[in-house]
Image: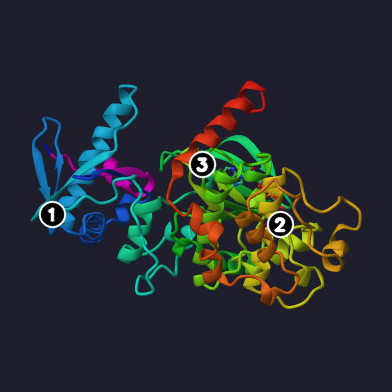
Amino acid sequence: MLILDLNSLRAMDTEAIVIRIKTPAGDMDSAVDCPALLNFNDLLVAIRDVMPEATVTAFEYEDEVGDRITVRSDEELKAMLSYYFNTMNEQRINGLLPDPLQIFPRAGKTPGIRNIHGLKVNTRPNPANDCTHAIPDSMANNSLKKSSAELKRILTNGQINAQDIHYQEQLGHGNGGTVYKAYHLLGKRVLAVKVIPLDITVELQKQIMSELEILYKCDSPYIITFFSAFFVENRISICTEFMDGGSLDVYKRIPEHVLGRIAVAVVKGLTYLWSLKILHRDVKPSNMLVNTRGQVKLCDFGVSTQLVNSIAKTYVGTNAYMAPERISGEQYGIHADVWSVGISFMELALGMFPYPQPLQLLQCIVDEDPPVFPVGQFSEKFVNFITQCMRRQPKERPAPNNLMDHSFIIQFNDGNAEVVSMWVCRCLEERRAQGHV
Ligand code: ATP
Ligand code: MG
């Protein structure tokens, strides 16, 4: 039986819920921050996005005795939400954690298998898809009529607010920020949250938020997934996917067959960023993340000039991975990222930074010939790859397509994630045994 009472309607305005879309390919869990703003058509659009091959015209939910009730209109949607909030209340009174709201799309024909690898709905970068007004905080108090793109994003990633994040442990501290492992209560997922204190005006904050919007469009298996960013007082928090293997700077002397697969992912990630006209600007081992599934992803690329400038004003740091032309203050482009790939992979192979440290480090990168590998320890293809990337003249370094065509990259471009996965797991095991994790 449906009960439409005042309390449940009030709860709809204030309480976030998780909707579980039951599809033949699996369950899709999505946090919806303000259920009162949901309308039937927008939810249908979101379902169709998950099941593109099917003709979905309605969906169903189950009442307390398991009977299916069809939803075809805004009225029926409201009734469903009201019923759900009542059930949630009862579960709470009985000391239970509320179940997600399960909905069963009614499909005209059988959908094909899609998204078999995870629950996250894929919003491909699509210029026609309006993803440009993506600042999460602006969503909270908006009009009832939400664009379907906006709603899809809420259903996809869940809106993340400061109060819904539970910080667990500090993962590391870099030049400007501190990164924490955290749990997002609504989205029910682990996050990495980078918190950077910034004393800047509200205007600048807005500019940074708008510059970060492009991150919502980044969609590559080689780039860390961005969920949300928000300012609380004078701190910006940037929420991204958590990588359980951490960054490569702590892995020493990576064997070539593993390094090759990592290099393929890094080159693909950079090629993707360059295709969006984004220079990474901070390629180095600590910005290459790995996980136990064998994925390798880039993080901390400079999409927001204002953010980069604001951090630079607060923290003075030198970047030893910068190309000579950048150190000299000349114009730079894609080739500067390519240099950083070279020096990073040289370090990862050797297990130590290839220039003498600290000794006027940066000037020697500009003045001296690039470092060379000790003879006989590494394959010819690998040595050639590094030598090409670290040519002093930017134009002599490989262009993006030449990088992908390099024999070292081709050799390891076999999609074998197992190699990296097993190596990450083994290293984590060893570190655990030594009491480091
Ligand atoms: P810099 O600030 O100079 O770029 P950094 O990259 O070492 O240096 P941070 O970006 O603040 O500093 O990151 C600190 C550490 O947090 C990283 O070295 C990495 O080990 C960890 N880390 C960052 N992002 C993630 C993530 N998404 N998942 C897991 N660990 C992460
Ligand atoms: Mg970093």
Task: Name the element at disc 3.
Answer: helix
Identify the amino acid type marked 2. Answer: Ile
Residue annotated with mark 1: 58
Residue 239: tell me if it is visible.
no
Residue for point 51% across, 66% down: 405
Residue annotated with mark 2: 343
Position in image of residue 74 (x %, y %): 18, 57
Residue 94: tell me if it is visible.
yes
Q: Nearer the viewer, mark 2 or mark 1?
A: 2
Residue for point 44% across, 68% down: 133
The correct choice, above or below, for 146 with respect to 325 in the image is above
Identify the amino acid type marked 3. Answer: Val
Residue annotated with mark 3: 420
Q: Earlier in the sequence, mark 1 or mark 3?
A: 1
Position in image of residue 11 (x %, y %): 33, 43
Q: Residue lying furthest right in this view? A: 359
Q: Earlier in the sequence, mark 3 or mark 2?
A: 2
Dot 1 alpha-carbon crowd within 10 angstroms: few under 14, some 14 to 19, many 20 or more: some
C-alpha gap between disc 3 and disc 2? 20 Å
The correct choice, above or below, for 378 with respect to 45 in the image is above
Dot 3 alpha-carbon crowd within 10 angstroms: few under 14, some 14 to 19, many 20 or more: many
Residue for point 42% across, 50% down: 415
